[in-house]
Image: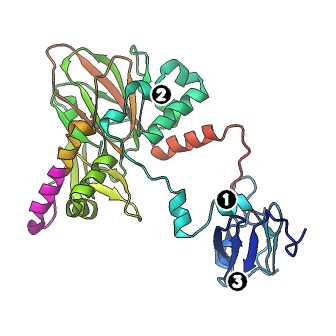
Amino acid sequence: MGCDHPPARVPRVETRTDCVQVTWPDGHAGRFPHFWLRENCPCPQCTHPEAWERIVDFMTIPLNVRPDAVEADAVGLRLTWPSGDVPCDGTRYSWDWLDSHRLERDARLARKRRIRGWTGSTISKDSLAVPYDAVMVGDDDLERLLAHVDSAGLGFVVGVPTDRLVVTEIAERIAFVEESHFGRHFDVVSKVDPENLAYTPNALQPHNDLPSRQHLPGVQLLHCRRNDVAGGDNVFVDGIAVACRLREQNPAAFDLLSRRPVMFRSVAADWEIANRATIIAVDEDGDVVGTRVHPALLGPVDIEPDEQPAFYSAHRELLSIALEAEMQFSFRFEEGDCVIFDNARILHARTAFDATTGYRHLQGCYVGRDDLKSRLQLLRRRGTEYRIR
Ligand code: OGA
Ligand code: ZN
């Protein structure tokens, strides 16, 4: 079966000076530059068959490389390259792989997962909760939990034992513990000589943890071992929804908070950590991908005097949105609850509590977002044969 008389379902292939254009039977098309087709060759000479990483040295491929032959069959595209210094067994791409890697901007945007943040009324603990016993043994249950964290930014493990440190066990069931200057795990209790405000009975305003670190911890776990104090209720807010709301109501304020880095710092007897970053993070398409909100760790705000009023007014407007009841999911920790949330996306807050009325003890730790997502991908691809190309 050659490209002269391809069956009807085989895409149409045209070789241009610098690319191969593929047009699928329904009319959608993609242009694949020759260099790109050469560099991504999956043959065992070009991609290591076990390590699944590229071995062809891209520096040795001529920038103007062109295939000697381009053939199309029912499976996919086959290319043969000029024999020279760079060995290759011949390149083969399936139609599906090419389709899912089309390079046109609209194709990339169509593939892109755009997070639509939630407002409080659409969230419930029950719909996001998975029992501890199930999560720790069942891969389907772990997948369900991680899917909640991935899509809503938030999930709950319920019925977690309270007689010992378990939060790091849950973290390690997911992936690896991500350590910080608070150690491998931390105890959130009201105590004498607190190293941070969370270790007091004070209220905590909506925040992302540790924005003073260049690398914001990815996913936070908080396990409640005891909670019988008056007060100390929690609020979760989708920071992406909050930032998008700010963009709608005050584009100039959004612009300022997404373009001007400001200082965050955390200082204690055992550390001194400072980092400049924007309060709203946007990607190349202008989509909000996270926030760094932490009123207690912000500053001193190091932007020019003339811009200070605009900054403070924008920051206040962002916080005001996060404090709107409509945006908030309110929650009171029951003993044995463990909440797991994306620390770049979800803001968390706490009301003040009266430490004389009982005891409140949470244990927390972090897991890398990349590792959580990787674990979810592996769970989702169970039972399928996976190939990079
Ligand atoms: C924290 C925190 C919330 C709480 O430790 O980072 O925000 O409910 N704690 O105590
Ligand atoms: Zn916190």
Residue sitting nearer the eye, 243 or 82? 243
Q: Amino acid at mark 2?
A: Ile
Q: Residues within 10 Å of mark 3 (few under 14, many from 20)?
A: few
Q: Earlier in the sequence, mark 2 or mark 3?
A: 3
Name the residue: 56% across, 70% down.
104
Q: CA distance from mark 2 to mark 3?
A: 54 Å
Q: Residues within 10 Å of mark 2 (few under 14, many from 20)?
A: many
Residue sitting nearer the eye, 269 or 177? 177
Main SS, magenta residues: helix
Could you tell me if residue 185 is visible in this image? no
Q: Position of residue 285 (x, y in %)?
A: 41, 64
Q: Amino acid at mark 3?
A: Arg
Look at the numbered disc 1 and give the secondary structure of its residue. Answer: loop
For disc 3, the marked residue is 16
Q: Amino acid at mark 1?
A: Glu
Residue sitting nearer the eye, 224 or 142? 142
Q: CA distance from mark 1 to mark 2?
A: 31 Å
State which quarter of the image contains the N terminus: bottom right
Q: Is residue 17 depicted above or below 320 in this figure?
A: below
